[in-house]
Image: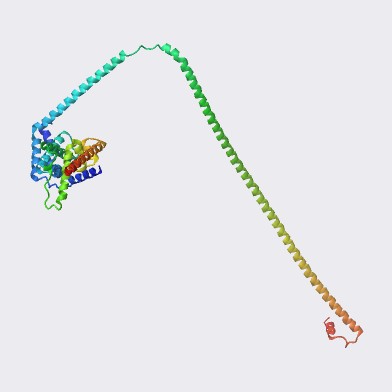
Amino acid sequence: MTVVAQKEFYLQVVDWKTIIKEHGPAVWQTAYRLLGNDADAADCFQDTFVGALELSRRQRVRNFPALLVRLATTRAIDQLRRRFRRERIGSLENSRPEEPENNPNPAQYAQQQELATMLKTALVHLQPQEAQVFCLRYLNDMSYRQIANELGIKKSATGVILHRARLKLRQFFEVSSKEHKSEVTL
Amino acid sequence: MKEDENILEKAVKSLKNQHVPPGPSDELAEATVKKLKNISEQPDTIEFNRQIQLANRITLLNSFIKFAAAAVFLIIAGFAAGRLTTTKPPDIEQIQAVLEPAIRNRLFGEMKQYMQLGLANSYVRLKDDLSEQYRQDLNHLAANIVAANGNLTNQLLENLIESVNAAQMQQQQLFTTALEQIELNRRRDNAQLSNAFVTFATQTENELNQTKQDMVELFTYTQSDGFVPKELNNQKKIN
């Protein structure tokens, strides 16, 4: 098979326009939820589909939605990690999304945003696979079996990784709450 | 720890329910499609991927060759070590002479034990079989005796019933005969009595008539004609 024929083969098999139309919103939601702004979410969106294209060249993709969500989660966490290293401030304040108009309870909204920012900061400190499994399970509601299939690991290993991630996140929140209390006391 | 768990759950909930503007925009989708198309149309991309695959294969082949060489080296080393550390072959006859009596005795003992065990088992099994056979024979004999007794009893009862029936029939016949005889005698006696009564009546009437006649004659001789009652005269006239 020549290069051109192979290229045509790939173009014929995968209709990326349809795939973006069908699964783009889920990818966008996954990326924006973690990154919190349009520019980073758009970069992550494009990187996700480029990664999917490269992957589809190497192997046959059986479940595009799950693959795209996994890639989007991975790219978004990588981007969060890069941003955290770049800023070196221990927080991700600029990752907060814009506040919706006519918010009925601003205090509660602010508290929720603070918790979400803390969780994103904690995810940066996890191992990449742990953060990925945690996001896929709790943010994208994927089952253990789906996660295991997507990551190429066993179902029991998924449970173990998720347990470790939860443990580390609890410890992170414990430390954060102690620091917060000491700051308030001072 | 429980509080941290709750905070974690709240944080997950907050992040999950975060407001996400609708997207992607049409421009972003178009740009992504164009980017994917550009990447797909780059001729060197596929060639590069093929080169990567070829390099991966070569790397895999190299590692396999190293692994095979290591395996061959290990096998040769093991064989050599085995040859060097091998002891002299033992004297088979001496071993045989030493081991044969012991093996023979042990085999004899084991065979004896095995035979005893087998005989004991056979004895127990035979005893059980004979007991079972004896029990079955007794049951069979008892069943036969019961059946024969039943048949004999039935036959005797049938004979008895037949005898009773015959006796009843005979008695009934005798009774009927007696009744018939009695009836015959009664009729005969009745007829004889009737005849006797008729005879007696006839004779009595004759005697009475004779007596009347005698009395008439007597009156006739002894008295006059006017003295004779009218009835005797009428009687005499009739006679």
- If the image is split into quadrants, where does the N terminus of chain A sit? top left
Query: Considering depth in this image, is B62 or B10 the residue closer to the camera?
Result: B10
- At horizontal 25% and vertical 43% (from top left) the residue drawn is B2
**x, y percent for residue B172:** 69, 57
**x, y percent for residue B99:** 44, 15
Residue B90, placed above or below residue B221:
above
- At horizontal 72% and vertical 59% (from top left) the residue drawn is B177
Query: Considering depth in this image, is B153 or B28 the residue closer to the camera?
Result: B28
Residue B29, placed above or below residue B115:
below
Query: Considering depth in this image, is A92 or B64 the residue closer to the camera?
Result: A92
- If the image is split into quadrants, where does the C terminus of chain A sit? top left
Query: Considering depth in this image, is A126 or B144 the residue closer to the camera?
Result: A126
Q: Quadrant of residue B230?
A: bottom right
Residue B102 seen = yes
Which colouring convention does the figure follow?
rainbow
**x, y percent for residue A36:** 12, 43
Residue A67 seen = no
Furthest toward the right, the residue is B222
